[in-house]
Amino acid sequence: MSKHEHERTAGGSGSGESKLSRASVGRFSLYLRHLDRLQREGTATVSSSQLGEALGITDAQVRKDLAYLGNLGQPGIGYSTPELIGALRQRLGVDRPWNAVVVGVGNLARALLRYRGFEQQGFRFVALFDADPTKVGQVVDDLPVYALERMVEVIAAEKAELGVVAVPANAAQEVTDTLVAAGVRGILNFAPTVLRMPSGVSLVNVDLAVQLEQLAFLVHLSREVGS
């Protein structure tokens, strides 16, 4: 059987949803980025082997991941690039715009606001908040900076569902509690602390120091293996 004959895989999103791992979701984002680039280059179809080779993933893992999206591949042809992009965006929940707010208007927040890739992927920052009274009332990247006391009011008015926490660790839990009370359903946390979250609210932690530690470990391990 040829590699293309493996493209049609069973197990639609309904049957495999409970088994979808966090790792698979992470690879969905990688597939989507690569497919977006292929579509811009005019590539109409792509095979699992092409995706796997580009991203350093085995053919079998690609087919297993994409099986969660339904029977999209065609024998002898592969996957339709636009169709696969649409299925991935729908499965990831990024087939619609998402409004987000940022709490803590420091250097990290300013860097995030300058990154235009968020808007291209459907993420729109609608408001900023800070505890520093000298920052309140400023406009940063065309967004007003509000006092923390106005979070509930502004988040409701802007219909924001996501919140970015970029405050010191000792303030992160209180800020998170206020975001949740305001109706935010997902938190991206840059504060180096463990947050307590209620059920029904999702949390993703981004700790750059931990990531660098992991990178250092991998380099250290490769040196040990090579010695």
Image (cartoon, grey):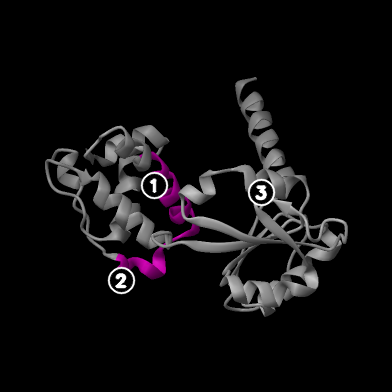
| Residue on which disc 2 sits | 14
As drawn, 97 above or below 113: below
Span highlighted in magenta in the image: 13-34
Q: Is residue 25 left or right of residue 159?
A: left
Q: Amino acid at mark 2?
A: Gly
| Residue on which disc 1 sits | 32
As drawn, 227 above or below 220: above
In the image, farthest residue toward the top: 227
At 59% across and 43% down in the image, what residue appears? 115
Q: Are marks 1 and 2 in contact (CB under 8 Å)?
A: no
At 42% across and 60% down in the image, what residue appears? 92
Query: Could you say which is closer to the camera, residue 160 or residue 83?
Result: 160
Q: Is residue 104 left or right of residue 18?
A: right
Mark 3 to mark 2 CA distance (whole Å): 41 Å
Q: Amino acid at mark 3?
A: Asp
| Residue on which disc 3 sits | 141
Mark 1 to mark 2 CA distance (whole Å): 20 Å
The answer to which of marks 1 and 2 sits earlier in the sequence is 2
Q: Position of residue 64 (x, y in %)?
A: 32, 53
At 65% across and 29% down in the image, what residue appears? 219
The secondary element bearing badge 1 is classed as helix
Q: Quadrant of the C terminus?
A: top right
